[in-house]
């Protein structure tokens, strides 16, 4: 349930009300001495930040996909050249 900002047209009192989206708009100022009409102010909303895992499609890849990806990345790495005994004996 969101917070809504209201402003009295008569006394210019600004206040915030926590109410449901389907609740009717307020019409009267909550100040004791004022019976002015209130108007709901437009809000820009708040910034939304997604942190952590679970927000992207790739976070929920299947185990078979992950295994295939791991295999493909290990196959793509160049193999190290290993020295053999023959090459050592030729150098001597």
Image (spheres, rainbow, N blue to C red):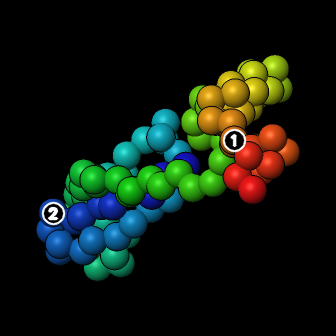
Ranked by sequence position, the earlier of labels 1 and 2 is: 2
* Pointer 2 residue: 9
Can residue 6 be seen at all in this image of the molecule?
yes
Percent across and percent down for residue 48 are 44, 53
- Identify the residue at horizontal 58%, vertical 36% (top origin): 56
Residue at the image position 37 percent from the left and 46 percent from the top: 25
On residue 81, the disc is 1
Judge left or right: residue 8 versus residue 82: left
* Left or right side of 37 for 22: right
Tell me, for residue 39, which label it has, or none: none
**Residue 24 location, quadrant:** top left
SS under mark 1: loop
Q: Is residue 85 above or below residue 35?
A: above
Q: How far across and how far down the image is residue 20, in percent?
A: 52, 45
Q: Quadrant of the C terminus?
A: bottom right
Is residue 35 visible in this depiction of the protein?
Answer: no
Give residue 13's position: percent from left, percent from top: 24, 74
Q: Give the distance between the C-alpha atoms of the residues marked 1 and 2, in whole angstroms.
A: 82 Å
- Work out whether 80 lies above or below 73: below
């Amino acid at each position: 349930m969101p917070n809504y900002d209201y402003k009295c047209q008569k006394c210019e009192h600004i206040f915030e009300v926590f109410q449901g989206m389907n609740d009717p708009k307020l019409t009267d100022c909550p100040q004791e001495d004022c019976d002015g009409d209130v108007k709901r102010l437009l809000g820009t909303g708040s910034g939304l930040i997604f942190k952590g895992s679970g927000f992207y499609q790739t976070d929920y890849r299947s185990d078979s996909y992950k295994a295939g990806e791991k295999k493909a990345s290990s196959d793509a790495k160049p193999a190290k050249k290993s020295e053999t005994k023959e090459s050592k004996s030729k150098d001597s």
